[in-house]
Amino acid sequence: MDCICSIQQAIEYMETHMMEKITYEDVAQHLYMSNYHFHRLFSMITGMTANEYIRNRKLSMAGQELVLSENKVIDIAFKYGYETPESFTKAFSRFHGVTPSVAKRSGTHLQIFNRLIIKIQTEGGTIMEYKIVEKEKFNLLVKVETFDNEIVGEEENTLIPDFWKRCNADDTFDVLKAHRVNGDVYGACAPLSKEETHFEYGIGSLYAGGEVPSGFDVWEVKANQWAVFQCIGTDGQCIGETWDRIYKEFLPGSGYNMLDDIDFELYPTENVAECFCEIWIPVQKKD
């Protein structure tokens, strides 16, 4: 499914079911996408998570209802999915800058958060280099941590970079060196079932075989067709920038769909000038 079309369908579904207790997991299920894939797609395209969108829309609507109706704060709190007036007041104050009781007073300034509308804009033409590679299945020896989709999607999140720092500080790379095929290093996201709210991220290398060391796992990466992108820059910021372009430029405009399978960053032994790493995503041709 085209990613822009997917986001439009997601917004339509959220708006239709806004007064129900829905989360990004419900939207992903509606689109027949894994929670992780949908969460990342929505965040990259819109700049916010789906749960943030739902929360902001409800608090915006609640603010208007407080001003325009005689309904009690407690009734509005329950209507918009808050279990207690206290939790509603806390969220409302954080969004609007005033409490619900103050919002009822005439002349109070409130925030409005309108429905998202996805528009295709024609801007300056840009070139995005990529290559399509056929690759047989292979195994990775990885140290793995589990992350929450929603938390990792938040702005300024550093959980995965912090994981890399811990691996650099302990004996992770010494262990990998003793079992690897070559010096290439991988940062890989595991495939997930559609219902998962967390995902596994592994740091590792091509596995040469033998006994699996304690604290490590072996992941089999299936034979696939891959779209490969260079991340041009001097630090990890270029990874996020490249992912942003993959979702906003490559996937909407190319003849490929991204598969719900392992994707990874590859840090090759032979460094290319200005290339921090490569991003490999599994793809298939669109119907």
Image: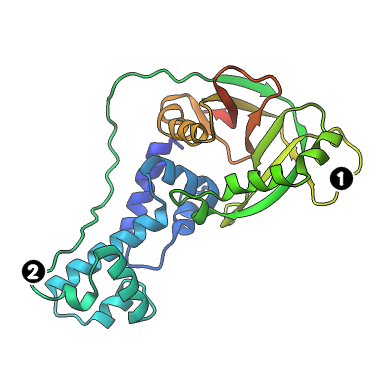
Note whether residue 287 is visible.
no
Front one among 279 and 114? 279
Q: Earlier in the sequence, mark 1 or mark 2?
A: 2
Residue 281 screen position, x and y as percent? 58, 32
Residue 221, quarter of picture:
top right
Q: Which mark is residue 107?
A: 2
- Above or below 107: residue 40: above
Q: Amino acid at mark 1?
A: Val
Colour mode of the rendering: rainbow
Residue 279 lies left or right of residue 220; in this view the side is: left
Residue 223, picture quadrant = top right
Question: What is the secondary structure assignment of the residue under circle 2?
Answer: loop
Callout 2 amino acid: Gly
- The residue depicted at 54 percent of the width and 32 percent of the height is 235
**Residue 178 at least partly seen:** yes
Residue highlighted by disc 1? 212
Side of 27 relative to 211 (left or right): left
Q: Nearer the viewer, residue 38 or 229?
A: 229
**In the image, which is nearer the foreground, mark 1 or mark 2?**
2
Q: Quadrant of residue 61?
A: bottom left
